[in-house]
Amino acid sequence: MADLLTRAEYEALAAALELPTNAFIDGSFRPAASGKTFPSTNPATGVPLCEIAACDAADVDLAVAKAREAFEDGRWSRMHPGARKDVLIRLAKLMTRNARELAVMESVDSGKTIYDCETVDVPEAIHVIKWHAELIDKIYDQLAPASDNHMAMIVREPVGVVGLVLPWNFPLLMLAWKIGPALAAGCSVVVKPAAETTLTALRMAELAHEAGVPRGVFNVVTGSGAEVGEPLGRHPDVDMVSFTGSTVTGRRFLHYSADSNLKEVVLELGGKNPCIVLDDAEDLDAVAAHVVNGAFWNMGENCSAASRLIVQSGVKAALLERVKAHAREWIVGDPLDPQVRVGALVSPVHFRKVCSYLEVAKAEKIHLGGKIIGEGFIEPTIAEVGARDAKLAVEEIFGPILTVIEVSSFDEAIAVANDTDYGLAASIFTANGKRGLRGARALRAGTVTVNSFGEGDITTPFGGYKQSGFGGRDNSIHAHDQYTQLKTIWLDLTDHSDACVD
């Protein structure tokens, strides 16, 4: 990624953007069948960006039909693996060529900081596409250990037509996490972006078509959950849905599947993730930097945010002083200012929700923040709770609010950490290697980091325990499994030649 520009330069780029506004179906942009639209608004300014096609069941039916046609005629599903790889590599190159446009588009559409879009989201999305592309012709099928008279082949086949339902917090990156393995496997996809953040999904579909992804293989249907998400989830010709979002909506997709064709459903849902800091943790300044990044990165709009700081008594005071010092460095403001680390919350509805938790925090002990910085903006807030079942300690806030819980021992820290309906991510800081590994084994979460905050990388599977989701994993070679079916081909090699009669 090139060096960051100035705020004025980013504002000029934003003003010059050519924004996609129509759904992308069968290789071209088209308005909703109804002709209806809905506004896309910059959450940082409240200024409308454009009018987006408000699709409904008719558009979903068309997109699924074209995806099915493309899948069955094999224009992508039966393309040589090396050829599919070449197409996705071209897509990654086009993304690189248009990286700054994608970053600015993502920022103005979602409220994300341009700093994060330029340095994390867009480069990582490109890397994800390249990684899965390179894997296409390197995954081998298997032979089972059958008898001498038989051969048993275990082969992978693409699952078919896949609905990909995206969240609004990482629109481009989550799109890459899903289309990378889905397209690599040979599936056709119908993407439903969040209504709040549709622009980069539409632009990516255009780039994919330019790269050589055949028409009908990559479709984007824009609109609300009720008008697009539910028809997609209930569609009898969709073979699978991969959903990232809230636990409440994830439950709905299980109902849609049960009420229709029992399509496979993969869910990556919410989290109330613990960050444990024990008395023997080394370099508290470095620990504090991890805590702040884990809590406030992407405005806390992150399913794997380290939103619960579970800290042992002996180190609490010293750690909190350092956490507050680092948090004060996270500037709140215009997302197009590259110095800003905390941008705007994604929508007025979500802003009001997070503000309601600030009211709850006033009844607790606020160590830092607690203020609204204009419409859509909340400063990083640190609140300590007295009760383990306090609302701030239990509910997923999805905003820049860190909840502090004091504990007296390692065992208590683990018990508090696991006392949640979720199990997506966790972290533990300790200088004792055995204790770190024991903690990592004991924590009920899909990803556990020791002496750092993070989610692993493209090589490691990402997903959760309990109500944080199930059915598959994003990232790594395991992500390909959810977009394929396993087939056994049993061959009888018995020699019957001796039984032949002349």
Image: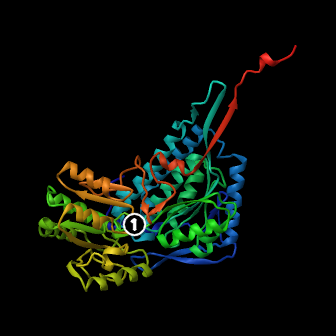
Amino acid carrying mark 1 in the image: Tyr
Along the line of sight, which residue is nearer the eye, 492 or 457? 492
Residue 136's spot in the image, x, y percent? 54, 41
Residue at 51% of width from left, 64% of height from top?
166
Residue at 52% of width from left, 48% of height from top?
480
**What residue did someone put label 1 on?**
422
Residue at 41% of width from left, 46% of height from top?
459
Q: Residues within 10 Å of mark 1 (few under 14, many from 20)?
A: many
Residue 257's spot in the image, x, y percent? 62, 65
Look at the image and tell me whether residue 232 can be seen: no
Q: Is residue 144 left or right of residue 351?
A: right
Q: Is residue 499 left or right of residue 472?
A: right
Q: Secondary structure at mark 1?
A: strand
Question: In this view, which residue lies farthest toward the front?
Answer: 499
Q: Quadrant of the C terminus?
A: top right
Look at the image and tell me whether residue 301 can be seen: yes
Q: Is residue 20 left or right of residue 488?
A: left
Above-or-below relation of 138 to 182: above
Residue 49's spot in the image, x, y percent? 49, 74
Along the line of sight, which residue is nearer the eye, 476 or 122? 476
